[in-house]
Image (cartoon, rainbow, N blue to C red):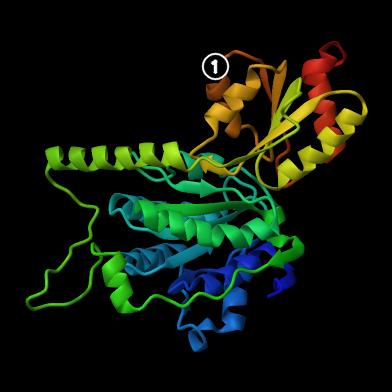
Amino acid sequence: MKDEIKLMKGNEAIAHAAIRYGADGYFGYPITPQSEVLETLEAEMPWETTGMVVLQAESEVASINMVYGGAATGKAVMTSSSSPGVSLMQEGISYLAASELPALIVNVMRGGPGLGTIQPSQSDYFQATKGGGHGDYHLIVLAPSTVQEMADFVGLGFDLAFKYRTPAMILADGIVGQMMEKVVLPPQRPRRTDEEVRQQCPWAVTGKAGGRKRNVVTSLELDSAMMEKNNERFQRTYREIEKNEVRYEACYTDDAEYLIVAFGSIARICLKAIEEARKQGIKVGLIRPITLWPFPYDAIKQTAAHVKGILCVEINAGQMIEDVRLAVSDRVPVAHFGRMGGIVPNPQEVLDALKKDFINPTEA
């Protein structure tokens, strides 16, 4: 059977992949540059084909709490938004994490702070990888760099969320959300039956009264000693995720004398810069973190052992650079290059920054 190849935006790929995964529900609110997720789902009308619920909520706060309720029943539910909207969802995301509920959250980043710009950005890195909301928790964070990965990470995000009973986030930037590329969509999966949900999620709220045990899902615990035990359990889960689920891509790192670390769409721009650098005899490699949490500390540490400098390239003022510096522990100098305000650097700017910081610093 031939692959089904379609040309579509990254946001559209998210919607189609959710339907084909057999997702039970989507609850969201429109905001640029991710509105096509909701628009595509409404156009496809999956409630008539797969039974998937698609609902435009009255706000981002309402949508994340609808996800909270759906996740508590063991259903595969999701939402999507952009940076200011995800800020509004932080309390609900923290509740999901504390209640150990699987859910998928998509953030197609725009510039900030505040309402900022509708142009692309990567300035939600801290918000996604450091918890964002209150409490000691993590999200599994996947950073796609292609439209194909936008589609692929829907299934992966749901699978990881259910495996570890924790929310997962697809952290995309506005470039990959809006760009159009060829995509191989996954095959259609049937939605799970209620009986399959009960078997796979025995912790879920069933709503059944009578002789059947009624589960209670809550993030509230008034006993401090019990809350500490809950947090210890969360941390054990996070250590397991860090052990098993680190994902990254390495290019030209075997002989690299310099290393660029970049995620999302900017990694593609950096790869072009690296190809030009190598034509000039400058041996540069790339590590693209695919999971921003758990972060590929070991991969960067090992590569740093044989390079002269690391350039962290982001569309922000410098956020991922903190994790890169933690990985290398001052063994090698680390510099940052980024643009803000929705401005995306080109490959020549990246190459010029590398030369300025490490190769010809006296010319800066």
- Regarding mark 1 in the picture, which secondary structure is present there? loop
- Left or right of 311 in this view: 363: right
Q: Nearer the viewer, residue 201 or 101?
A: 201
Residue 313 placement (x, y as % from top left)? 70, 34
Seen as rendered, the residue at the extreme left is 211
- Left or right of 24 in this view: 305: right
Do we see residue 210 in this rendering? yes
Q: Is residue 149 above or below residue 294?
A: below
Q: Is residue 68 above or below residue 306?
A: below
Q: Nearer the viewer, residue 323 or 242?
A: 242
Residue 147 placement (x, y as % from top left)? 69, 59
Q: Quadrant of the N terminus?
A: bottom right
Q: Is residue 310 above or below residue 156?
A: above
Residue 18 placement (x, y as % from top left)? 53, 69
- Left or right of 98 in this view: 80: right
* Residue at image mark 1: 329
Q: Amino acid at mark 1?
A: Ser
Q: Nearer the viewer, residue 127 or 10?
A: 10
Seen as rendered, the residue at the extreme bottom is 48
- Count of numbered badges drawn on the protein: 1
Residue 318: name its quadrant. Answer: top right
Give the crowd class for mark 1: few <14, some 14-19, many >=20 residues within 10 Å: few
Q: Residue at x 35, y 65 (%)?
A: 71
Do we see residue 345 in this rendering? no
Q: Residue at x 83, y 16 (%)?
A: 359
Q: Residue at x 22, y 60 (%)?
A: 217
Residue 110 placement (x, y as % from top left)? 64, 52
Residue 66: name its quadrant. Answer: bottom left
Seen as rendered, the residue at the extreme top is 362
